[in-house]
């Protein structure tokens, strides 16, 4: 299972980290220069959650943004499920 949000498609991105030297022109220097570039990874804020997909509970990766926006439908707790089933039988 990839490290990717099942709802928004967010996944790890590859980028670079730049190292600078010098003083900015607006501060009175001659400008900043890039002295090195190293590769790095930008990882999304993914949470492992139990959700309902096609009527069945599953564990998937979901981004924090998807959780906050209400896109994710979480499954019912086991105790809540049994309480409703007991009331329906009675």
Image (cartoon, rainbow, N blue to C red):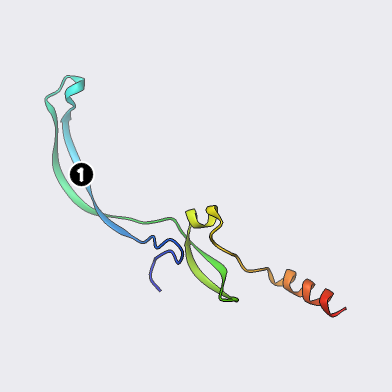
Question: Residue 4 appears in which quarter of the rendering?
Answer: bottom left
User: Which residue is depicted at the point 20% across and 22% down?
Assistant: 26
Q: Judge whether 63 appears above or below 28 on screen.
A: below
- Crowd band around label 1 with a 10 angstrom C-alpha radius: few (<14), some (14–19), many (20+): few
Residue 88 position, x and y percent, is 82, 76
Tell whether 44 sits left or right of 81. Answer: left
Element at badge 1? strand
For the view shown, which residue lies furthest in the right direction?
90
Q: Residue furthest bottom?
A: 89
Q: Position of residue 63 (x, y in %)?
A: 46, 58
The outermost residue toward the top is: 28
> In the image, residue 46 lies at what x, y percent?
45, 59
Q: Is residue 5 above or below residue 27?
A: below
Q: How many marks?
A: 1
Where is mark 1, residue-wise? 18
Above or below, 57 against 5 in this view is below
Q: Is residue 13 above or below residue 18?
A: below
Occupied quadrant, residue 50: bottom right
Residue at 33% x, 60% y: name it: 12
Judged left or right of residue 1, residue 89 is right
């Amino acid at each position: 299972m990839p490290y990717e949000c099942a709802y928004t498609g967010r996944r790890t991105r590859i980028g670079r980290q730049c190292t600078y030297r010098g003083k900015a022109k607006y501060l009175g220097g001659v400008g900043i220069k890039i002295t090195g570039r190293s590769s790095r990874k930008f990882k999304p804020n993914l949470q492992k959650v139990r959700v309902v997909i096609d009527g069945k509970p599953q564990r998937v990766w979901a981004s924090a943004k998807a959780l906050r926006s209400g896109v994710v439908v979480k499954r019912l707790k086991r105790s809540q499920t049994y309480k409703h089933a007991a009331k329906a039988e009675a």
